Amino acid sequence: MRAVTLYTSSFVLTAILCWSSLLSSISLIQTSSVPSGDIKPTSGGTLDVKLEPIPSPIESGQETNYKVTFLQKGTGTVQVHIDYDFIILKDNTTEVFRASQQTGQPLLHTAEGIVTMPFTLEDPGSYTIRVPVMGINFIPMATEDADFHVNVE
């Protein structure tokens, strides 16, 4: 039992340190309201994901805050405790940004179900914002993606 307690304590400490690193590395901001935005189901249909770029439209060279809200399928209710990532692809092929790489971890976690990722796209063009979901309520699942296609002016 003592080994389980030590392992759990070590895991919690590692999670806290990773979270702290994430906050300082990419200025992750957690919020609680759900404004209007583009909503897509994940590829397996388990969740809906809402994306709201602020400001909109996205302009090259200008920092944009990408607000992501995880919603229970078809309800508009925020789903808490999501394991996810946030990826930006240029022309649907070239990876420009992956949020999890900022922490050195394979995934990110939101307790509240709403996150905002700040990032500046330097070049105009066609981009895909991919939000892979890997777990809900601390239960791992087969990865499901929600893809959003955006044009940058």
Image: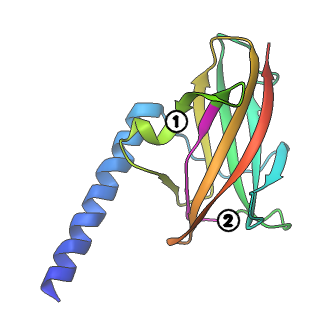
Q: Badges 2 and 1: C-beta atoms under 8 Å apart?
A: no
User: Which structural element holds mark 2?
Assistant: loop
Q: Magenta residues? A: 79-88
Q: Earlier in the sequence, mark 2 or mark 1?
A: 2
Judged by depth in the image, the label closer to the viewer, 2 or 1, is 1
Magenta stretch contains residue 117:
no
Return the x and y of residue 105 as percentages of the image width and height.
38, 48
Mark 2 → mark 1, Cα distance in angstroms: 22 Å
Which numbered tag is attached to residue 33?
none
Magenta stretch contains residue 82:
yes
Q: Quadrant of residue 129?
A: top right
Q: Please name the residue that numbered disc 2 is placed on.
A: 79
On screen, residue 43 versus residue 39, left or right, reads left
Name the quadrant of the C terminus: top right
What residue is shown at x 29% (from left), y 50% (from top)?
17
What residue is shown at x 61% (from left), y 57% (from top)?
133
Identify residue type, mark 2. Answer: Gln
Which numbered tag is attached to residue 98?
1
- Look at the picture and state if 24 lies above or below 40: above
